[in-house]
Image: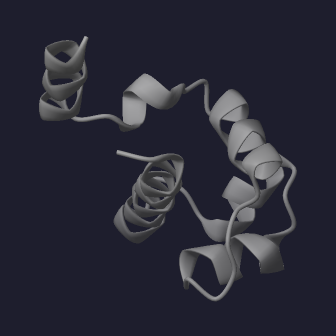
Amino acid sequence: MDFHELQMRLVVFLRERVRSGELTERGLARITRVSQPHIHNVLKEKRFLSTETSDKILRRLRMDLLDLMRPEDLAEWQRRR
């Protein structure tokens, strides 16, 4: 697992929340203080999230990297330790 994969999981998480109606692009932009056009382009995979923007989104949504990890990722990490 690398950081790029975690960023992509964040985008998938956000896309699923918008698709389900739990969030809107505009609402997500307002909550995270990232422009709506940028959010739109990220969700459509036309642009990428910077590390700083990813951190900002995680903070605003009260999430951390562990929220993006699957149980098997954590099990693999423990095996390597």
State the residue at coordinates (13%, 17%).
Answer: 79
58 relative to 30, above or below: above
Picture mark count: 0
The N terminus sits in image quarter: top left
Residue 69 lies left or right of residue 51; in this view the side is left
Between 63 and 26, the one lying in front of the other is 63
Which residue is farthest front? 80
Between 8 and 17, the one lying in front of the other is 8
Q: Residue 16: where, in percent of width, then height?
A: 37, 62
The C terminus sits in image quarter: top left
State the residue at coordinates (67%, 79%).
Answer: 40
Q: Quadrant of residue 19?
A: bottom left
Q: Quadrant of residue 36?
A: bottom right
State the residue at coordinates (16%, 27%).
Answer: 76
Q: Residue 28: where, in percent of width, then height?
A: 68, 55
Q: Residue 4: where, in percent of width, then height?
A: 51, 57
Q: Residue 22: where, in percent of width, then height?
A: 45, 53
State the residue at coordinates (69%, 47%).
Answer: 54
The coloring applied to the image is: one colour
Between 42 and 51, the one lying in front of the other is 51
